[in-house]
Image (cartoon, rainbow, N blue to C red):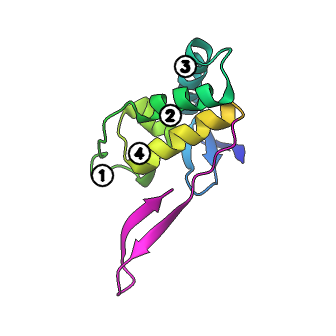
Amino acid sequence: MLENIKQKDNILITDKSWFGGVWSLNDFLMAEQNLNKFIEKKCKNLSDFEKFICAYHFASNRFCHFAPKDSSFQSDKSYVDVINEGFCVSVGYATILKRLCDKLEIKCAVQGCFLKDRFGKVVNMLIT
């Protein structure tokens, strides 16, 4: 669920889901506008299956590219940051696809978990 938060004269958008993030209103609107343009241009008058294929190609049509080491956790994982900044890892592909499916009213789910070694240290994330 998205909510608006007023902080130091800046409006922030917060998505509290597992794959969410916190963005400035401008960044959020820029990403949403890019998705809406794509939908308007490529996904009109298509069946649900064709819409899903279009969404899949949009999400997967980018290189896997890690954000710089000093970046926030969401920089290559949240759909807003991936669309606006271009850094993308597996979670980024999944969140873009999920957001497009939501906009196209196609049922879709993204699930994730942290994989831990025998000492309890997080070693990877698994996305399905």
Residue type at mark 4 is Ser
Q: How far apart are labels 1 and 2 at the CA level?
A: 29 Å
Q: What residue is disc 3 on?
A: 38
| Mark 2 residue element | helix
Residue receiving disc 1? 70
The amino acid pointed to by label 1 is Asp
Residue ID at (70%, 44%): 2
The residue that mark 2 highlights is 56
Answer with mark 2 or mark 3, whichever residue precedes in sequence. Answer: 3
Precedes in sequence: disc 1 or disc 2 = 2
Q: Which numbered disc flags the more N-terminal residue, 4 or 1?
A: 1
C-alpha gap between disc 4 and disc 1? 10 Å
Q: Nearer the viewer, mark 2 or mark 4?
A: 2
Please state if 128 lies on the left or on the right of 39 as rendered: left
Q: Earlier in the sequence, mark 1 or mark 3?
A: 3
What type is the residue that disc 3 sits on? Answer: Phe
**How many numbered marks are there?**
4
Circles 1 and 3 in contact, beta carbons < 8 Å:
no
Cα distance in 3D space between marks 4 and 3: 22 Å
**CA separation, marks 2 and 3?**
12 Å
Nearer to the camera, 125 or 69: 125
| Residue identified by numbered label 4 | 75
